[in-house]
């Protein structure tokens, strides 16, 4: 599969992850987002930058745990109130925020998490 | 019912000599069930043939991937077969977890509805219920997973938990059907499911967290071995004894029977007989339920009922298998305020664990690593002598010697160990 961005052909896999991560640019990101029916705004772009920086530093993408802990911070008094930040993330990326952000930030596809009993 | 061993089923596409062994014996067999079902659903025949190959080669041919229904971070266990060339219908064979009604009490109408949806979209195999506490529906490909999820939700079902999330809660039937129940297990299960539904659908914990709820220490929900946080019904004060019924029971069964089966089997030796009267040393009763189970007409849990909250059961990962141990010896669970207290406690424990836990660390392993003292301090819970890991094993110290003066009469001299300054937590961690 492939998409056209600024006259250049960019290879993606069937889910939309970049085949060559060097191909990433903001325009590519936007094209993939279009394909997934997401209109990129500042909030989206900020998170995509965060994902790229985090990956650069840790060689691993941020998990949902990291996002709600660090970016969500301490919303409200009680622990369960920090879920508000997660709701916000799901509003931006309804399908699966972490996987979608990895895709848009040109990171590898997240590995399946533990799903045992 | 199970068929005879030499009956290979009527589906000619099946060749499963090893699986056929599992049809032997008087008990029901999943092999017989699936064989019968394979006549309706061709993928089930492939499923059986692949399993046969697994048994033959002692190898598992399933791999996992990620598949999420929009808005959900879990609930679908995506499975792909490595033998898809040979068994094309198993190329995608996902499982959907569905939250069952509390206590697994379905109306037949709802159960039919569930079965119909699963048959319409998938392989029509239901597992009621997995250790996870969910109703599991098997055999969906990518497309039909989404279709089934939509259909399920339109019919009032919801997806269960998976991954590093709160898992679907599980409880015993409790007060709905059982006279032993010390609190309303089904209400508790429903309340916590609704209150924490976002934690169930959208994983973000260090690792999974399971809550199971049993109305009494008989623990029909398997909470003590199968959940991070068992909530077990118990009581304070004396148990209810109907001495007339005790006497009737003794007349019926004989005094030897009562001594052999009740008195001597009390784990803390707190029962005795005075003629035909049963004397209970309630202070030493550990609410194990044994005597009540045997003499259920004469004995009942006490009137002041509530729950004990434990923490820490899990299978082997960072440390070996563990059972839960007590974290809150007694909590009332009746009024709205009581339930508020419970969620407050859960919030604090989750917060401390998630702020300080390591990746893939269950809460029991976290406590084992940081120490119970640190954990209690972090969650603002008072230490209590009833918080013991394992009961009644020989201690290496003579407790009376070390105990404060008023414990076992006045001490004659101050033991040296007791005077030692406790090490500060910072230096030891
Ligand atoms: S755990 Fe106790 S209350 Fe619940 S069903 Fe079993 S015996 Fe009854
Ligand atoms: S409930 Fe258990 S500990 Fe209590 S008196 Fe009965 S047998 Fe003994």
Image (cartoon, helix red, strand yellow):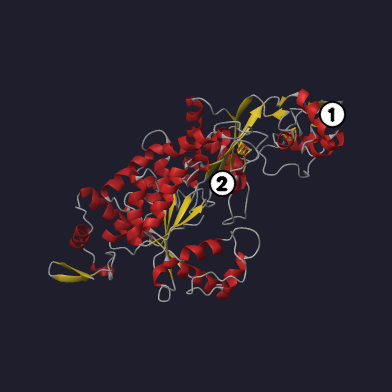
Disc 1 crowd rating (10 Å Cα; few below 14, some 14-19, many 20+) is: few
Mark linked to residue A114 = none
Q: Is residue A4 left or right of residue B61?
A: left
Point out the quarter of the image occupied by ligand 2: top right
Q: In terms of depth relative to the viewer, which is nearer, B294 or B115?
A: B115
Chain under numbered label 2: B
As helix, strand or loop, the secondary structure at mark 2 comes to loop
Is label 1 in contact with label 2 (beta carbons under 8 Å)?
Answer: no
Q: Residue at x 85, y 34 (%)?
A: B254
Chain under numbered label 1: B
Q: Which residue is mark 2?
A: B227
Q: Is residue A95 left or right of residue B51?
A: left
Q: Which residue is mark 1?
A: B273
Whether disc 1's CB lies below 8 Å from ligand 2 is answered no
Q: Disc 1 versus disc 2: distance between alpha carbons?
A: 38 Å
Could one spot residue A71 in this view of the protein? no
Q: Give the percent coordinates (x, y) of residue B282.
A: 74, 27
The image quadrant that residue A48 belongs to is bottom left
Q: Tell which circle, 1 or 2, labels the residue nearer the N-terminal end.
A: 2
Q: Give the percent coordinates (x, y) of residue B211.
A: 53, 43
Decide: is B208 above or below A13.
Answer: above
The image quadrant that residue B311 belongs to is top right
Q: Give the percent coordinates (x, y) of residue B98.
A: 43, 49
In which quadrant of the rendered image does the N terminus of chain A lie? bottom left
Q: In terms of depth relative to the viewer, which is nearer, B38 or B320?
A: B38
Q: Give the percent coordinates (x, y) of residue B399.
A: 78, 37
- Residue, far left: A7
Decide: is B282 above or below B23.
Answer: above
As helix, strand or loop, the secondary structure at mark 1 comes to strand
Q: In terms of depth relative to the viewer, which is nearer, B402 or A96?
A: A96
In front: mark 1 or mark 2? 1
């Amino acid at each position: 599969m492939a998409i056209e961005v600024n006259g250049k052909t960019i290879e993606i896999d069937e889910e939309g992850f970049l085949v060559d991560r060097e191909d990433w640019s903001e325009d590519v990101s936007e094209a993939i987002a279009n394909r997934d029916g997401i209109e990129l705004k500042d909030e989206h772009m900020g998170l995509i930058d965060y994902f790229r920086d985090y990956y650069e530093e840790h060689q691993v993408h941020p998990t949902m745990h990291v996002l709600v802990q660090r970016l969500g911070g301490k919303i409200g008094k009680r622990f369960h109130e920090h879920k508000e930040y997660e709701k916000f993330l799901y509003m931006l990326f309804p399908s699966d925020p972490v996987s979608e952000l990895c895709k848009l930030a040109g990171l590898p596809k997240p590995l399946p998490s533990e799903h045992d009993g | 019912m199970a068929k005879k061993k030499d009956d290979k089923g009527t589906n000619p596409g099946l060749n499963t000599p090893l699986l056929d062994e599992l049809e032997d014996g008087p008990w029901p067999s999943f092999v017989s069930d699936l064989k019968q079902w394979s006549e309706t659903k061709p993928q089930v025949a492939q499923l059986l043939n692949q399993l046969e190959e697994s048994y033959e080669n002692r190898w598992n041919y399933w791999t996992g991937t990620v598949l999420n229904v929009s808005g959900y971070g879990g609930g679908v266990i995506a499975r792909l077969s490595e033998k898809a060339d040979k068994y094309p219908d198993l190329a995608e064979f996902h499982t959907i977890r569905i939250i069952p009604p509390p206590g697994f009490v379905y109306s037949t109408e709802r159960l039919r509805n569930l079965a119909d949806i699963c048959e319409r979209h998938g392989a029509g195999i239901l597992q009621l219920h997995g250790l996870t506490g969910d109703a599991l529906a098997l055999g969906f490909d990518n497309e039909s997973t989404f279709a089934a999820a939509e259909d399920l939700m339109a019919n009032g079902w919801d997806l269960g938990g998976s991954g590093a999330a709160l898992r679907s809660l599980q409880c015993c039937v409790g007060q709905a059907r059982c006279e032993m129940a010390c609190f309303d297990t089904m209400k508790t299960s429903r309340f916590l499911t609704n209150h924490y539904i976002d934690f169930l659908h959208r994983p973000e914990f260090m690792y999974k967290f399971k809550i199971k709820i049993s109305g009494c220490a008989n623990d029909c929900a398997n909470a003590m071995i199968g959940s991070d946080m068992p909530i077990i019904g118990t009581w304070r004060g004396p148990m209810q004894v109907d001495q007339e019924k005790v006497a009737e029971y003794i007349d019926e069964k004989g005094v030897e029977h009562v001594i052999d089966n009740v008195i001597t089997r009390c784990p803390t030796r707190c029962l005795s007989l005075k003629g035909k009267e049963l004397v209970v040393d309630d202070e030493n009763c550990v609410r194990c339920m044994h005597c009540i189970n045997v003499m259920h007409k004469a004995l009942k849990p006490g009137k002041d009922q509530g729950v004990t909250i434990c923490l820490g059961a899990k299978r082997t990962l960072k440390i070996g298998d563990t059972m839960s141990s007590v974290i809150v010896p007694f909590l009332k669970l009746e009024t709205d305020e009581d339930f508020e207290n419970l969620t407050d406690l859960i919030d604090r424990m989750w917060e401390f664990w998630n702020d300080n836990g390591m990746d893939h660390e269950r809460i029991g392993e976290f406590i084992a690593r940081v120490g119970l003292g640190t954990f209690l301090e972090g969650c603002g819970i008072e230490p209590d002598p009833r918080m013991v890991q394992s009961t009644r094993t020989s201690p290496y110290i003579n407790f009376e010697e070390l105990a404060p003066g008023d414990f076992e009469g006045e001490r004659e001299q101050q033991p040296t160990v007791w005077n030692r300054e406790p090490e500060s937590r910072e230096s030891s961690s």
